[in-house]
Amino acid sequence: MLALVSAAGYGVSDFVGGIASRRVAALRVVIVSYPLAMVLLSVLALFVDGHVTGPAVWWGLLCGFCQAFGVWWFYAALGSGPISVVSPLTAILVAGVPVGFGVLMGERPSAVALAGIAVALVAVVLVSRGVSDEDVTEHRFTTKVAWLTVGSGLAFGLNFVVINEAPHDAGLWPLVFARIAASVMVVLIALVAGQLRVPTGVPLWLALSAGVLDTVANIAMLWALQNSLLSLTGVLISLYPAGTVALALLVLKEKVTRWQVVGMVAALAAVAMIAGG
C-alpha cells in the first residue's frame, strides 16, 4: 500500500508539474517544488523519531544527486528526442534497476511475484507510450538522446537503491538531505540554463502543489522500502505513469491509446501478483 501511495503521489505530481510546464519552462517549476519539499520534509522530520548520523547524511545526499541528474537528463532527452521512445525506455530502467540490485543483494521473490515484476515492466512501457508517430519524425533518437535517456533511467532507478541503504533509525532525515542536495543541483542547473526565475500565477500554485505531492510520495517511498523487498517495492513505485495517464484522460480529456489501456490493465494485474506473491 505504501508503494502504491508513493506511485500515486509521483504520478499526480508529474501530472500537476506537467501542466505547469506547459506554461513555463520545466526547470522553473522544479526550482519551486523541490525546495518546498525540502522545507516540508525538514519540518516533518522534527516530529518523527530519527537520528542524524553520518550514513543518513551520506545516503541522503547521494540520493539527492541521483534525483537532480535524473530530472535534468530526462527533460533534456524529452526536449531533443521522441517522447514515445524516451519515456518508455526511461521507465523500464527505473523499474529494472531496483530489481537487478535487489537480486544481487540476495532478495529472492516468489515465482508469482517474479511473474508480477515481468508484467509490471511491460505495463510501464505500454502506459508510457502516449504520443503519435508525428513526434518521432520531428525529434530524432540520436546518440546524445540515447545517452541522456539511459542516464536519466539509471539515475532515477539508483535513487531507490541508494535511499534503501539509509539507516532505518534515521527517520525522515535521509529524505531531508536528499532534497537539500537535489534543490541545490536544480537551482545551479536552472542558473546555467538561464531559467532561474520563480513562476507566478497559476504555474506557481501548480508548482507548490507538486511540491506537496512530492513530499507525500517520498515519505511513502522510504517507508515502503524499509518494510519490503527493494525489487518488489521499486517495481510497484515505477507504475507511477499510470496515474499521470489516468489524470490526463479524466481531466484533460486526452485520448488514450489501445496500448495504454492494455498497460493499465496489466499494471493492475501486476500489483495483484506482486502483493499475492
Image (cartoon, rainbow, N blue to C red):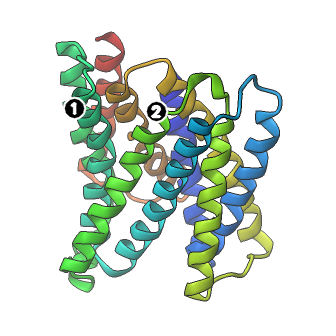
Amino acid under disc 1 = Val
Q: Position of residue 157 (x, y in %)?
A: 36, 47
Q: Position of residue 222 (x, y in %)?
A: 55, 32
The residue located at (67%, 33%) in the rendering is: 172
Q: Quadrant of the C terminus?
A: top left
Locate residue 226 relative to residue 275 in the image: left or right. right
In the displayed structure, 44 sits above or below 132; it is: above
Lower sequence index among marks 2 and 1 = 1
The residue located at (72%, 51%) in the rendering is: 38
The residue located at (66%, 58%) in the rendering is: 34
Residue 252 in view (yes/no):
yes
Residue 191 lies in what quarter of the image?
Answer: bottom right
The residue located at (24%, 24%) in the rendering is: 116
- Mark 2 sits on what residue? 165
Q: Which mark, residue 119? A: 1
Amino acid under disc 2 = Glu
Residue in the foreground of this view, choosing between 167 and 87: 167
